[in-house]
Amino acid sequence: MIRSRYFLGPVAGLLLAAAFALPVQAQEFTPSHIAAARNAIDAAHASEQFDRILPVLADQAKALFQRSNPSAVSDIDAVVNEVALKLASRRPELDRQLERLWAARLTEEELNGITAFYTSPVGQKFGQLMPAIVQDSVRAATTWREALSTEIVTLSREELLKRGHTF
């Protein structure tokens, strides 16, 4: 499966921000609604992208400490890995937040429909291909944006030059 770290980082951040921005804490959901959210999330593989958060943070912490004290690389690796392993037990906190986020946005019936789709053959294929599709879409949008950026600057400069301005 192809995944872009440039895409997943921002997406993960946006989804986490959205999860915490919603007033889902005050809402009460039935156990079956939460279960439906969990099933839909699992079927859609929607939380798997967040599995890289802790390893990425650990790598960043290692790099930070290693820049300050390159001679302590082995101790830094050991300590950061130990701390990261302890923090891994907190992953269910994110899962509960995601379940509540999905439950706040979708009815139990809708969640069951999502699960049904993602467990169907076409849904399974879509789930497998979605990261590549998103990556290709982001790449296409980036190429399009860059072309428009060049064109807007070029055409605007030409018009401004006609009006006597220099750049």
Image: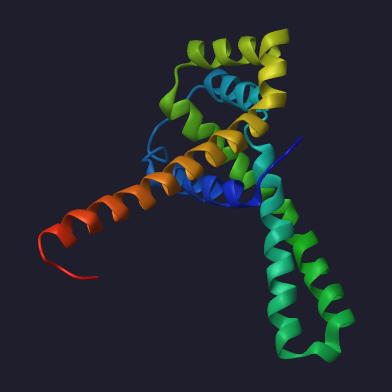
Asked if residue 162 lies left or right of residue 56, the reply is left
- Quarter of the rendering containing residue 2: top right
Q: Is residue 134 above or below residue 122?
A: below
Task: Kindly indicate the quadrant of the structure image that contains residue 41.
Answer: top right
Residue 59 appears at what percent x and percent y?
Answer: 74, 67
Q: Choose between 145 and 161: the one closer to the eye.
A: 161
Figure check: 49 above or below 32: below
State the residue at coordinates (36%, 40%): 23
Task: Give the vertical position of 107 relative to 137 (above or below).
Answer: above
User: Could you tell me which residue is drawn at 38 percent across and 52 percent down?
Assistant: 150
**Residue 151 in view of the camera:** yes
Looking at this rendering, what residue extends furthest in the left direction?
A: 163
Which image quarter holds the N terminus? top right
Location of the C terminus by quadrant is bottom left
Please tell me which residue is depicted at 38% across the width and 41% down the height of the picture: 22
Foreground: 7 or 82?
7
